[in-house]
Image: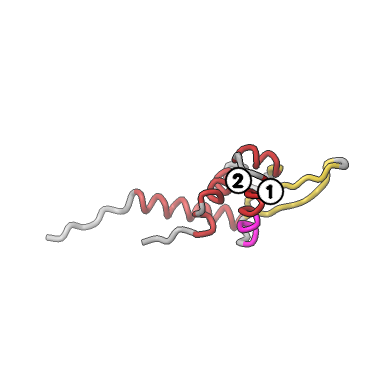
Amino acid sequence: MTELDPVIHAQARLRVVASLSALSEGDRIAFPRLQELLAMTAGNLSVHLRKLEDAGYVEISKTHRGRTPATLVRLSRRGRLAFEEYTEAIRALLDPAPSKELS
């Protein structure tokens, strides 16, 4: 049986990665916009982003827009690959290859 990536499998992190995977590769989203999309508190989202960042699945950059600080988030190539493997594993669990009947 295929193992599911425990970093992605947590519900909140799965929602984060799925949302980020909808962006084109290399595109970033502002932290407040991601927070709004996911309806998560800033603290909760920060904790899950940290776990994803520690795994190398997301990249977080801090910059300024004018004088206003901005935190931007994107899915790394490693994260995109991990999410693709995760979705393949889920599909395999939901629609396993037909087993041969024993005669």
How far apart, in angstroms, are the residues tagged by discs 2 and 1?
A: 8 Å
Would you say the magenta stretch is mainly helix, strand or loop? Answer: helix
Name the image colouring.
secondary structure
| Residue drawn at 68 percent across, 43 percent down | 29
Q: Amino acid at mark 2?
A: Leu
**What residue did someone put label 2 on?**
20
**What residue did someone put label 1 on?**
73
- Magenta part of the protein: which range? 50-54
Sequence-wise first label, 2 or 1: 2
| Residue drawn at 64 percent across, 44 percent down | 41
Q: Are marks 2 and 1 in contact (CB under 8 Å)?
A: yes
**Secondary-structure class at tag 1:** strand
Q: Amino acid at mark 1?
A: Val
Residue 32, image x and y in percent?
70, 41
Q: Which mark is residue 37?
A: none
* Residue 18 figure quarter: top right
| Mark 2 Cα shell of 10 Å, populated few (<14), some (14-19), many (≥20) | many
The answer to whether residue 8 is left or right of residue 75 is: left
Q: Nearer the viewer, residue 91 or 45?
A: 45
**Quarter in which the C terminus is drawn:** bottom left
Residue 47, image x and y in percent?
64, 54
Q: Residue furthest right?
A: 67
The answer to whether residue 55 is left or right of residue 60 is: left
| Residue drawn at 64 percent across, 48 percent down | 45
Q: Is residue 76 visible?
A: no
